[in-house]
């Protein structure tokens, strides 16, 4: 399974030699230069691996030998990697003392496994006429022994004759070039190629519904989105330096990664659908555990005076508003099968799960939070004035008009009404003394209805219109309430906790605070 759309898995013939009963050596061509393009239209230019191989040798690193690109299944080690005219020639030894290595050894002897596949990251590429790219520099990550070829041009040959260290003629033709192949053996090679091409066509037909759509959908995704999906699928340890930069990580100490811009935009959209406080309030970012804002408590009072007379003296007083930051979090688990399935819309799934959890938590806290381990809700503030309704157990049109004009004009002009669906059902029936409904439907699509010319928003966490409940809120929320953001949504990938169930757990967290900063900008109607 390729780790991203810039990686391709090339499958080429493998020579298998068994020098003695306990040791197995494999040889093959892991990648070829030029030729037919792969499934996404890419070809590899000669020498594309040279810089990567030089860097690997200089660092004394070893290219990993895996089974089917599974980082949890190393099966041996590559002892020789050569950048030749044919392509990337490799030689390695299976670790037969390990279960996975022993199993691969047995399958290769039986001819079941006979393909190699490279996992790499593209460093540089040039566009090809007619579409696709020519990969001019590649960072080699690992080389796997795999079951299914993924490239139509791959020629997989029989390995039955390799048990004694020799090659079959068809194998020799594939690994060393077919020019010296005697013509009398051409039918043998043609029959082998036809058989394997038929097998490839059958497999690709079965996979068509899976592979076709994502290739189109992923074409124009931003680098940070691709990097995040690779992080979710394969983990940070299997990503290159450029991909890790694209993660926009601000949480390295905990191994997490910030959700890229494309994800954050969708998450914010979903949150505002359930929490109008996030939409209507002003949000401020901070780099500390709390936001401290200066606040004027009393203003200067001027007085009339005569010429040359003493001016009155006054002194304003100032205080501070402190808004602490709190953490909300959630985790969800996704099966490895879903992560490995190229048709699985991981972005949509993670976005929906995290947005739903954080949206519900924020919605409740910004309205009703008590400030203990969570933001302080606007209804919990004793500084927000409450106007009692004129009649016990109900709210009428006069109550709403009274509250509307008790808010100062400068706030009233940018004010909004907030209430839950139960209150909305009652308010829509209210009429003025002249019999006109105070509710006005919007004349423009996507715009909220209005009461007394100001928009109405449904807030599910507002109380029902029962006795003593502050059922309606009105005012300029951008002035009255402040949301403080310390850390945007961060995701931690945990492949270990549920590994026995073949699942990966994703932990999402966000640090946010909220509190009333200007009480006079809003008022509530409390049912008498």
Image: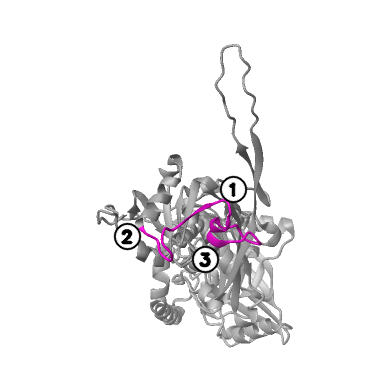
Determine whether 322 is above or below 194 in the image.
above
Q: How dense is the environment of label 2, judged by Cα within 10 Å: few (below 14), some, or many (20 and up)?
A: some
Q: Which residue is mark 1?
A: 285
1 vs 3, front mark: 3
Q: Which residue is mark 3?
A: 360
* Residue 83 visible at all: no
Q: Which residues are magenta?
A: 367-396
On the image, the x and y values in percent for residue 33 come to: 51, 61
Q: Earlier in the sequence, mark 1 or mark 2?
A: 1
1 vs 2, front mark: 2
Q: Which residue is mark 2?
A: 430
Q: How dense is the environment of label 1, judged by Cα within 10 Å: few (below 14), some, or many (20 and up)?
A: few
Magenta stretch mostly in which secondary structure? Answer: loop
Can you tell which quarter of the image residue 380 is in?
bottom right
* Residue 211 visible at all: yes
On the image, the x and y values in percent for residue 429 come to: 31, 63
x 51%, y 75%: residue = 338
x 37%, y 59%: residue = 396
Q: Earlier in the sequence, mark 2 or mark 3?
A: 3
**Is residue 373 covered in magenta?**
yes
**Is residue 206 covered in magenta?**
no
Q: Are marks 1 and 3 in contact (CB under 8 Å)?
A: no
Can you tell which quarter of the image residue 311 is in?
top right
Q: Secondary structure at mark 1?
A: strand
Q: Give the alpha-carbon distance from disc 2 to disc 3, as whole Å.
A: 30 Å
On the image, the x and y values in percent for residue 306 come to: 56, 15
* Residue 222 appears left or right of 441: right
Q: Earlier in the sequence, mark 1 or mark 3?
A: 1
2 vs 3, front mark: 2
Determine whether 268 is above or below 318 in the image.
below
On the image, the x and y values in percent for residue 375 come to: 60, 58
């Amino acid at each position: 399974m390729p780790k991203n759309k810039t990686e391709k898995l090339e499958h080429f013939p493998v020579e298998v030699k068994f020098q003695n009963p306990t040791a197995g050596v494999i040889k093959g061509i892991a990648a070829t230069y030029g030729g037919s393009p792969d499934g996404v239209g890419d070809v590899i230019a000669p020498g594309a691996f040279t810089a990567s191989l030089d860097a690997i040798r200089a660092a004394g690193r070893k290219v990993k030998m895996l089974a089917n690109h599974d980082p949890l299944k190393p099966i041996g080690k590559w002892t020789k990697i050569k950048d030749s005219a044919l392509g990337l020639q490799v030689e390695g030894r299976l670790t037969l003392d390990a279960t996975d290595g022993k199993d691969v050894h047995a399958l290769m002897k039986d001819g079941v496994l006979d393909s190699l596949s490279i996992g790499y990251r593209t460093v540089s590429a040039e566009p090809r006429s007619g579409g696709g790219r020519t990969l001019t520099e590649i960072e080699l990550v690992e080389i796997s022994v795999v079951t299914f070829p993924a490239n139509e041009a791959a020629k997989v040959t029989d390995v039955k004759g390799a048990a004694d260290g020799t090659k079959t003629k068809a194998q020799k033709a594939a690994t060393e070039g077919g020019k010296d192949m005697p013509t009398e053996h051409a039918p043998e090679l043609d029959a082998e190629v036809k058989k394997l091409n038929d097998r490839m066509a059958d497999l690709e037909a079965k996979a068509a519904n899976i592979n076709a759509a994502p290739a189109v959908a992923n074409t124009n995704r931003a680098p940070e989105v691709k990097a995040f999906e690779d992080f979710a699928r394969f983990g940070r340890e299997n990503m290159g330096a450029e991909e890790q930069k694209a993660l926009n990580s601000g949480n390295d100490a905990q191994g997490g990664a910030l959700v890229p811009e494309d994800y954050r935009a969708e998450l914010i959209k979903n949150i505002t659908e359930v929490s109008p406080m996030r939409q209507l309030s002003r949000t401020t970012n901070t780099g500390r555990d709390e936001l401290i804002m200066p606040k004027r408590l009393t203003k200067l009072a001027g007085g009339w005076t005569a010429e040359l007379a003493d001016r009155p003296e006054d002194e304003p007083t100032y205080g501070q508003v402190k808004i602490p930051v709190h953490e909300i979090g959630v985790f969800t688990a996704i099966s490895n099968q879903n992560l490995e399935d190229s048709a699985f819309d991981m972005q949509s799934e993670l976005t929906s799960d995290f947005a739903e959890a954080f949206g519900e938590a924020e919605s409740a806290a910004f309205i009703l939070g008590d400030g203990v381990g969570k933001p302080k809700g606007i209804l919990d503030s004793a500084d927000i004035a409450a106007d009692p309704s004129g009649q016990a157990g109900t709210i009428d049109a006069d109550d709403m008009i009274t509250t509307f004009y008790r808010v100062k004009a400068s706030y009233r002009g940018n004010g909004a009404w907030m209430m839950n669906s139960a209150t909305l059902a009652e308010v829509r029936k209210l009429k003025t003394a002249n019999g006109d409904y105070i509710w006005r439907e919007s004349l423009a699509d996507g715009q909220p209805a209005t009461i007394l010319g100001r928009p109405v928003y449904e807030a599910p966490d507002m109380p029902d219109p029962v006795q003593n409940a502050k059922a309606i809120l009105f005012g300029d929320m951008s002035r009255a309430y402040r949301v403080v953001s310390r850390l945007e949504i961060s995701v931690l990938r945990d492949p270990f906790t549920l590994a026995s169930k073949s699942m990966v757990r994703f932990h999402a967290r966000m640090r946010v605070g909220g509190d009333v900063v200007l009480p006079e900008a809003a008022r509530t109607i409390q049912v008498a």
